Image (tube, rainbow, N blue to C red):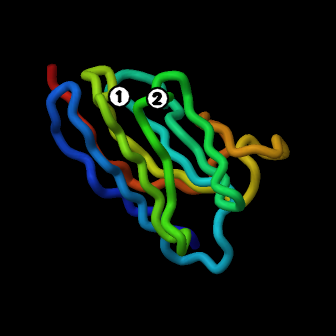
Amino acid sequence: QLQLVESGGGSVRAGGSLRLSCKAYGYTYSPYCMGWFRQAPGKEREGVAAIYTGDGSTDYTDSAKGRFTISRDNAKTTLYLQMNNLEPEDTAMYFCAAAFGWVPPMSGTCAAGISGWRYEGQGTQVTVSS
């Protein structure tokens, strides 16, 4: 059973940076897709970024483009999200997610959305103050 454990959240001032990590445990074959989504209090889940572990291709939602970078280590056991120029609107619980197939299913891609993820972690809190 794949398990995902996030770390790296915290409190920063607007304009600051954070790097989130997600360690994956308990798998034999690497998930096709891994990604991040977030949820702020009282709001719907929102996709942030996704990566195809096969070739490292990435996808970002508009709110993340140009500021956030998703990556994974060479052993493909840890996923990262580098977040720069953070804004108060980025305040949310950030979740790591994974799937052993395309996201969404049968799409042939790993999209930075909220549908199709099979596994998710417990989340790490990011708070950005103005």
SS class, disc 1: loop
Determine which quarter of the picture holds residue 18. Answer: top left
Check if mark 1's residue and mark 2's residue have beta carbons within 8 Å.
Answer: no
Residue type highlighted by circle 2: Gly
Say which residue label 2 marks. Answer: 66
Q: Where is residue 47 in the image (x, y as percent from the top left)?
A: 53, 33
Q: Where is residue 17 in the image (x, y as percent from the top left)?
A: 25, 39
- Report whether 26 appears left or right of 40: right
Residue type highlighted by circle 1: Ala
Vertical placement of 32 versus 77: above or below? Answer: above
In percent of the image, x 50 and y 53: which residue is there? 71
In percent of the image, x 62 and y 38: which residue is there? 59
Q: Position of residue 80 (x, y in %)?
A: 43, 54
Numbered tag placed on residue 64 in the rendering: none
Say which residue label 1 marks. Answer: 40
- Report whether 23 appears left or right of 72: left
